Structures are given as structure tokens and as C-alpha cells.
Image (cartoon, rainbow, N blue to C red):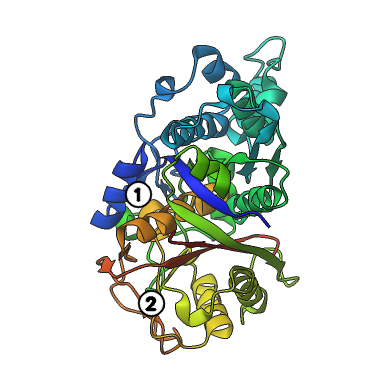
Amino acid sequence: MKRVVITGMGTINPLGDNIDTFWDNILLGENRTAIISRFDASLFRTQIASEIKNFQPEKYLERNEIKRSDLFTQYALYSASQALEDSGLDPNTMDPFDIGVIWGVGQGGMETFENEVENYVTGNYIPRFSPFFVPRLIVNMASGMISMKFGLQGINYTTVSACATSNTAFMDAFNYIRLGKAKVFISGGSEAPITPASVGGFSAMKAMSGRHDDPKTASRPFDRDRDGFVMGEGAGALILEEYEHAKKRGAKIYAELVGASMTADAYHMTSPHPEGIGAAKAMSLALEEAQINSDQLDYLNLHATSTPVGDIAELKAMQLAFGKSSNLWVSSTKSMTGHLLGAAGAIEAIIAIKSINNNVIPATINIENIDPAIPEGINIVVNQPLEKTVHTAMSNAFGFGGHNSSILFKKI
């Protein structure tokens, strides 16, 4: 099997519109959660989110690309453009069929859907629906528009597995390169879910935090008083490249992707298995594929979203998979970014890679009273980053429907 390395990264999210700013703010423990400004959420149980402010798509997007695309696609194009630029790859010097795009999206064009339906009902738009309605709405348009922007004619599609989506995309790209089906992939995920219907739906489920009096502390994984996740938005992109191809062109290599796996809970529509059986198997399979022992794993970026049930189930799964490893440290960076749904795994993969590059593990912020239900023997990085040599880092992403995914990077 061929080896797969990471040669480019890009992002747009609540903590930054580029990799360096994002990483700096992660290490500073920044949090931008606030009362939602994009629409009036006062009738909902949850009225807070981590929004991207002052987004300037024209930095990477042409005017017609902005006009024809929903915000989730704009985020995808923005981060993918950064990642390709960072990689130093020039698609014009390659066979276009050797470069593919596998992109993850959880919900798709929610803003487009809501606006068009509202215009139809109120009669404010004649002839009722825009000809761009369907192209802006469908989830595969992000991968399609990335390929059109750069003339990439290789494998191209979109994965959907709720909040495990980005890891699903990475896993597929990883396997296609290993099998020799492509030399390069632009892969990642994007989401633009801060809309009335999306926020209202999750709010009705009581899945999100109602801590409106102090929004910046609302996302608090592992804290005794956590009451749900905080919605975020944005995108993250990686350039996955066949190792020999990257080496031949003298590319900078951030890390090697050495393991990726998925399992299903087969348990409940929205709740994880309480003992974490499926999640544990996903982590174990990623380690097995990478031929790495559990005591060689240095950092695990947990999916932990700050829900009462999910955080504990994941920690139980971790212990089931790895036992009690004194070397392994864990954290949940959703305490800073909020939960980007289908894009969560993309930005957290970036964090895992940056931890390897910089030998520092980001913290879980907002922990005031550690949950006494947390199993003993787990090393959580609390409130301040931990300087530690990081050779290997895993990132978990789990989704409604019982989807479990784990990806594993190592220093090269």
C-alpha cells in the first residue's frame, strides 16, 4: 500500500480565517460564542452560537462563485483554496485526473432552503424559486465547485455521516491514494448551520446549551454543569498526497495519515451507546491499521461536544480501547470553537496535526468542576495547553445515526 501524507492545510472558522490565526487562538484558549447576530433567536431555548464574523469570501472566491453558492460552499472554496496554496501544488502541471476532491457536508444549503421557501410562501420572489435554488442547496456542490475552480477531474464526491462527515471524507481519500486511484486529494468538510431552522431544530431537541448569561463558558466538555453543545460554523481542508509524489516535488510534509476507521453503534438515532462499544472499536481499528500500540499514542482530540451523555460515553470508549495509558493526554477543543457539525472533524484534524508539529496539546477550557462521573486514570488537559512531545495524534468524530470515526496521524 502507498503512504499518504498531509502537504497543505486551510480553514475558516470562528477562531480564524487562516491556519496560523486559528492555531494561535486555540493555544490562547479563545472563545467567540455570543448571542446570535444573524437572526432573532429570542424565541428559542438556545440563543447563542459561535459565528464567523466579517467573512470576506472575495479573498479567494470570484464574484460569480459567491453569487451561485450557499455559505457552506463558500466556506469550502475558501479553505480549499488556502490548502492548495499552502501545499505549493500547481494543478496545471499535473494530469487533472490524478487530483480528486472528497468533501464532507452534514446539512447542506440550509440558508438557501429557508430563504427560498420563505420567498415562495410570502410571494416576495417571482417566479417563486431562483434557478440557483437546487445547485446552491445540494450537498455535493461543495466538492463539485472545488473541482471546477481548479480544473480537477479525478474522483469527486461528497460524504454525509452527520458530525462524523469530515473524517469519513479523509478516510475515503486516504484509501483511494493507498490503492493508487489518485495521487492527490483536496479533502475536508464545511458547514453553515447557524440558521433559524437548524438552530431551532437542535434547540427543540434540547441538545444545545442554554447558558445565555455567560455564552463564552457555555461549551464546557467534562464539566459537571455542562448542558449541551454550542453550534459553530466554518470549514477545514487538508491536501492528502501520495508520499513519493510529495517527496519528489520537495513538498513540506506536516504529518503522515496512518490509520482511519469507521463503525456504527446500531443503538439510537441521536444518543451514543452508553458504554461506547462502537466508538472503542473505531479507535482500536485505527490503531491496528497504523500498527501502533495504545501506549504509543500521545494525544487524542476527543469528539466531546459538552453533552451530559456523550462526553462520558466517549471516555468509557477510550478506556475500553486503550486501557489506562499514562502517556495519553486528551482534550476537547470544541470548548473553544463550538461544534461545527459536519466540519468539526476537519478543523480538529488540523489541530491534531498542529499538535504534532509544535509538540503542544491544546486545552479543554471552561472546566470549573470536573464531572465526578469521569472514569479514573484519564489525563485531561484542563484550561492551559500542555507542552509535550507528540509523535502520534488521533481525532475522533461521531454523528447522529450512530456513526463513529477515528483518524490517526504521526510525525514524519
Q: Nearer the viewer, residue 42 or 379?
A: 379
Residue 14: x and y in percent read: 38, 43
Residue 227 in view (yes/no): no
In the image, residue 368 sits, relative to residue 324, either above or below, namely: above
Say left or right for 253 vs 213.
right
Q: Crowding at label 2, few (<14), some or many (≥20) Cα neighbours within 10 Å?
A: some
Distance of label 1 from label 2 (alpha carbons):
20 Å
Residue 355 in view (yes/no): yes
Q: Crowding at label 1, few (<14), some or many (≥20) Cα neighbours within 10 Å?
A: many
Residue at 50% x, 31% y: name it: 89
Residue 163: x and y in percent read: 59, 55
Say left or right for 213 vs 110.
left
Q: Which mark is residue 276?
A: none
* Outermost residue toward the top in this view: 126
Residue at 45% x, 47% y: name it: 232
Residue at 31% x, 78% y: name it: 369
Quarter of the picture containing the N terminus is: bottom right
Q: Earlier in the sequence, mark 1 or mark 2?
A: 1
Dot 1: element: loop
Say left or right for 220 vs 271.
left
The quadrant in which residue 279 appears is bottom right
Residue indicated by mark 1: 33
Q: Amino acid at mark 1?
A: Thr
Residue at 44% x, 59% y: name it: 412
Dot 2: element: loop
Q: Which mark is residue 224?
A: 2
Q: Nearer the viewer, residue 353 or 110?
A: 353
Q: Nearer the viewer, residue 406 or 108?
A: 406
Residue 237: x and y in percent read: 51, 42
Q: Nearer the viewer, residue 115 or 61?
A: 61
Q: Amino acid at mark 2?
A: Arg
Residue 142: x and y in percent read: 62, 32
